[in-house]
Structure formats: C-alpha cells, structure tokens
Amino acid sequence: MGEVAEAVHKGGGHVIGIIPTTLMGKEITGETVGEVRAVASMHERKAEMARRSDAFVALPGGYGTLDEVLEVIAWAQRGIHDKPVGLLNVDGYYDFLLAFIDKAVDDGFILPSQRHLFVSSPDASDLVRKLEEYVPVQDDDPETPKLRWEVDQVVVGYSSSLHAQIAL
C-alpha cells in the first residue's frame, strides 16, 4: 500500500493512513506521506476507513485484503452501507474468488441480486467507471435486517468507535 500512497501523494491527492498503534512499528518502515491516524484496534481501523470512504477498492493482496473486502461486501449485503466496492482483478488474480461467489449463488448461499454488491475489472480506468456508475443493490430478501453503523458509539467488548443499530 505504500506504493499506492506514494503515487496518490505525487499526483496531488490527499493520503490518510489509518493504523492500529500495535502495528505502527511493523507496518511503517520508512518515511510516510500524508496523514497517519493511529487507532486502538483493527475494528476501529475498519470503522474509520469505512466512515471516511466514498468507495472501497481491493487490489491483489493476502489475508488482510480478503478480510477487509469481504467484510465491506458483507456490510453491503446487510444494508450497513451502500457504497461501491470494487476488485481490481489484475491478471485474473480474483478469478477464483469470483468463481467461488458464482458457485455460492448457484448453490443458494448468496441471493442472485447480491452477486452485484461489488464490481470488478482487470483495468483500473474501467473499474473506476464501474464504481462511478454503481447503483446500490436493493435487497430482495425481506428477512434481511437493515443495519446502520454508528461510528461514534462503542461496541461492547471492543475498544472501538463502532456500534451497530438494528433498524427493522
């Protein structure tokens, strides 16, 4: 992510890095660009990133990337947000994940309408276009509760600023 932050900064964009204090020594190894905001936990990090984001984009990555992108897709599924989510599928990196999701739809684990909770493209410009054109999926499952994240609350058991409020 350092290279992405550097490119955004060089292009005149504003960079905000949100990192748990416990990871600062491991993750920040050189000079930083932009603003670095330390938070208490990964939960607080995700909440802060979600609050500040207009969209979510996953580049090829590992477990952390999968954790974060699948969580924001699940949040969209539950009505927690309606922001666009995109996968930059460079060299088919996410092909197996996309096939898994298609199989989950075919097997009835994911509603067909929810297959479109995110967009993907192998091309960055095309992905940006799809994110700009994204229309939130209207859930066709009446049993799905609608949730709203309240960022200024505390989740029981976590030192976090995230709280879920069920609005049926």
Image (tube, helix red, strand yellow):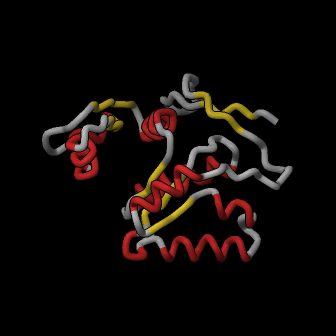
In the image, residue 58 lies at what x, y percent? 43, 57
Q: Nearer the viewer, residue 72 or 56?
A: 56
Tell me which residue sits at (74%, 76%) in the image. 107
Q: Residue at x 70, y 53 (%)?
A: 137
Q: Quadrant of residue 157?
A: top right
Q: Is residue 150 left or right of residue 95?
A: right
Total residue callouts: 0
Q: Nearer the viewer, residue 128 or 70?
A: 128
| Residue in view at x 61 percent, y 28 percent | 150
Q: Residue furthest right?
A: 142
Residue 152, quarter of picture: top right
Q: Position of residue 131 (x, y in %)?
A: 52, 53
Horizontal relation, residue 157 to residue 142: left or right? left
124 is higher (above) or lower (below) than 46 = below
What residue is shown at x 73% (from left), y 67% (from top)?
Answer: 109
Image height check: is 103 above or below 149?
below
Q: Which quadrant holds the C terminus?
A: top right
Residue 15 position in % (x across, y down): 30, 37
